[in-house]
């Protein structure tokens, strides 16, 4: 218990939670149960993703609108450059500004068909261009993506850092990382960005793993590695969700403990619209509603 008791002597980190816009009334109900359960932890913000190719454009907007209208939470709307001209993306951003949204998570997005990414004609090519475009529309607080294991299309870590600098020069004030399981990947990223003179917060993205098979499939696409130790921990638990959840919380809480020890004062949770795992991890970190 030494390790757990240590959490109560240091101030808990700030947290934020990511949700995705629901497709069905049942999913909508689950999302709102999750938001209601996590809201008392006073997250710095809650973000809502934007589906590939703008496929969730209306649903993202609707969800962000409900958060503004029905809660005291600060929403961050994700926005991508995929399959839309600059004028179309700008129109979405203006609608957010008019609705009172002041925080955008600005991303390039990926090819909706899974192939190589091709910028849309007259569209923003990279997230740095999107950030610059957003800043012309309003003085948004802008978060961008960072990649502890390198963006899969990037030629090198150095290139990644260079492009991160471009995003910051365009107006981004915070980076949120892709999820990772070995904290050393995050530590190395922070060392590299600080050595390059970048001072903005690099907020680690935490994915509590409920289902390792699903995570493996997704990780192959987004360039995050799934270590053998993680797979071993979930071996034989396919039909045992209760034990999987206990393992998920234990693994993520230990990851968070090491990040806090490293100096992280803000953790971002990929909730996948379920509150239980993130809520339990936050409690272990000393957060109280
Ligand atoms: P960019 O910064 O544009 O980089 C993309 C690639 O282009 C990289 O390889 C980079 O090295 C290269 N590059 C950048 N600038 C230049 C340049 N000037 N010249 C040449 N090459 C360059 N996707 C969604 O569809 N919806 C979401 O809601 C969403 N949310 C996310 C949230 C977080 C926190 C993260 C980490 C990712 C999210 N993604 C989302 C996934 C993201 O869209 C993909 O990872 C995408 O492949 C990269 O996005 P980016 O903003 O980093 O792109």
Image (cartoon, grey):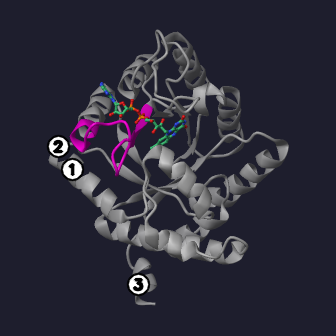
Residue picked out by circle 2:
196
Point 52% across, 16% down: residue: 90
Q: CA distance from mark 2 to mark 3?
A: 33 Å
Residue hosting label 3: 3
CA distance for labels 2 and 1: 6 Å
Residue 49, image x, y percentages:
58, 39
Residue drawn at the location 64% of the way across and 72% of the way down: 245
- Badge 1 is on which residue? 192
Decide: is 251 above or below 226: below
**Residue plotted at (44% across, 79% down):** 8
Element under label 3? helix
Count of picture labels: 3
Q: Secondary structure at mark 2?
A: loop
Residue 285 visible within the image: no
Would you call the spot at circle 3 few (<14 residues within 10 Å), some (14-19), or many (20 or more)?
Answer: few
Can you tell which of label 2 and label 3 is closer to the viewer? 2
Q: Is residue 155 magenta?
A: yes
State the residue lying farthest toward the right: 25
Disc 2 vs disc 1: Cβ atoms closer than 8 Å?
Answer: yes
Q: Quadrant of residue 14?
A: bottom left
Magenta extent: 141-160
In this picture, residue 287 sits left or right of residue 263: right
Residue occupying image coordinates x 66% and y 66%: 276
């Amino acid at each position: 218990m030494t390790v757990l008791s240590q959490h109560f002597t240091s101030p808990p980190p700030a947290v934020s939670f990511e949700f995705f816009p629901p497709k069905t009334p049942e999913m909508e109900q689950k999302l709102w149960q999750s938001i209601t359960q996590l809201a008392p932890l006073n997250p710095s913000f809650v973000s809502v993703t934007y589906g590939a190719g703008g496929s969730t454009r209306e649903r993202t907007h609707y969800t962000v609108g409900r958060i503004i209208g029905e809660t005291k939470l600060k929403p961050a709307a994700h926005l991508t450059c995929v399959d839309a001209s600059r004028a179309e993306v700008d129109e979405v951003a203006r609608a957010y500004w008019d609705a009172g949204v002041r925080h955008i998570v600005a991303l390039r997005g990926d090819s909706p068909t899974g192939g190589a990414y091709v910028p849309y004609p007259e569209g923003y090519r990279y997230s740095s261009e999107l950030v610059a475009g957003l800043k012309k529309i309003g003085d948004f607080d802008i978060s961008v993506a960072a990649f502890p294991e390198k963006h899969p299309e990037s030629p090198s870590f150095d290139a990644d850092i260079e492009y991160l600098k471009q995003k910051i020069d365009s107006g981004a004030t915070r980076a949120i990382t892709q999820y990772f399981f070995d904290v050393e990947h995050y530590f190395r990223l922070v060392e590299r960005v600080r050595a390059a003179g970048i001072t903005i917060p690099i907020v680690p993205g935490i994915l509590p793993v409920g289902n390792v098979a699903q995570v493996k499939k997704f990780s192959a696409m987004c360039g995050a590695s799934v270590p053998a130790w993680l797979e071993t921990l979930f071996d034989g638990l396919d039909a045992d969700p209760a034990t999987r959840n206990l393992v998920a919380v234990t693994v993520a809480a230990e990851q968070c403990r090491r990040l806090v020890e490293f100096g992280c004062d803000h953790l971002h949770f990929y909730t996948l619209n379920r509150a239980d795992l993130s809520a339990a991890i936050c409690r272990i970190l000393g957060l109280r509603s």
